[in-house]
Image (cartoon, helix red, strand yellow):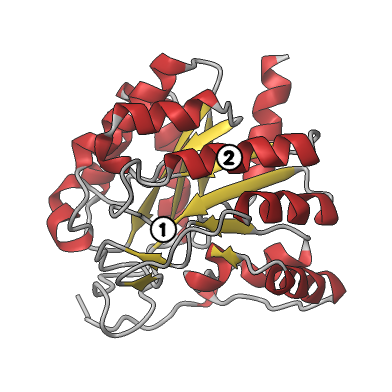
Amino acid sequence: MSQHPRKPPWIKIQHHRNEDFHEVGKMIQSLHLHTVCEEANCPNRTECYGNKTATFLILGSVCTRQCKFCNVSKGTPDAIDPQEPQHVAQACLHLNLEHAVITSVTRDDLPDGGAEHFAQTIHAVRETHPSCSIEVLTPDFQGSASAIAAVAKAKPEVFNHNIETIPRLYQQVRPGADYKRSLHLLEYVKTLNPSILTKSGLMVGLGESPKEVESTLRDLHLAQCDAVTIGQYLPPGKDYYPLADYIHPQQFEEYRKMALKIGFKHVASSPLTRSSYHAKNMVHHHQKEEV
């Protein structure tokens, strides 16, 4: 397998920068906010900004872990901004969002990993823009039951935590993370509040086999994970974990069918699928089913 596979035509992204794209960017700057769209160099940020949506990155922009796939800055984080929850809420109101995704860097330097800050942000959005559904995409909080409970108690509609890759690749791709710990987090959320939609995401193209993907999907389903996203890994640069291969769209369709057959309620699987891409559609479809 080539170390540098040639980018296939289905990976190319159409950039449409309209007035909404620029409005979102200006507003985020004015409120001193971060988005994972920019920090992680997401390939869909132009489309999402153009649709007046963004995934807010709280707890700063510097991560305490050294994951080999992620473009977010790593090192010593800054102090938490106490105004950040209200700024996120103001942004949600200003954009009239129907669904807000709130994620963060990993903050192993904080006693609760930033869980209370997540809860405060959820509460601020609820108070400021109550019609907006909320999805959190959290780190693992080092498996702390009290930290996980603090976020679940704030009652986001969706609790997302990405498994990211198959267990065989964890040491190389996710040093500092633990496969079973991530599965336990998802299962624990469901025991705390069965009404919360639990969700996880998986990257492919790092050298995993379809059988390994299937095994990981089965592990997630056993952990009572309701929804899953599967997308193509795109290394941010030459110093990151190497790309093994571009996965064909037909294989993504096979993964989608596989996940539905295993029992997931909602599945998004395509080369450009990301954790929060079209997240609004997934949660609103789920809400309609529950009525």
Q: Residues at badges 1 and 2 in contact (C-beta under 8 Å)?
A: no
Residue shown at the point (39%, 73%) measured from the top left: 71
- Residue underneath mark 1: 105
220 vs 247: above or below: above
| Residue 225 shows in the view | no
Residue 36 coordinates in the image, percent (x, y): 53, 63
* Amino acid beneath label 1: Val
**Residue 202, horizontal then vertical, whole percent:** 37, 49
- Point out the image quarter for the N terminus: bottom left
Label 2 secondary element: helix
Q: How would you rate the neighbour count of disc 1 (Cα within 10 Å): few for under 14, some for 14-19, many for 20 or more?
A: many
Instruction: Give the amino acid at mark 2.
Output: Gln
Could you classify mark 2 by the number of other residues whose Cα lies within 10 Å: few (under 14), some (14-19), or many (20 or more)? some
- 2 up-or-down from 214: above or below: below
Instruction: Decide if residue 256 is on the left or right side of residue 289.
Output: left
Residue at 28% x, 38% y: name it.
182
- In front of the other: 202 or 121: 121
Marks 1 and 2, Cα distance to the nearest angstrom?
A: 16 Å
Q: Which mark is residue 287?
A: none
Q: Hey, which quadrant is residue 175 in on the image?
A: bottom left
Q: Position of residue 146 (x, y in %)?
A: 35, 27
Residue 200 seen anywhere in this rendered image of the structure: yes
Precedes in sequence: disc 1 or disc 2: 1
Give the residue number, with chain letter if any, for mark 2. Answer: 120
Q: The residue tagged with tag 1: helix, strand or loop?
A: loop
Residue 68, image x and y in percent?
25, 68
Q: Quadrant of the C terminus?
A: top right
In this orientation, which residue lies closer to the viewer: 246 or 23?
23
Q: Residue at x 24, y 66 (%)?
A: 66
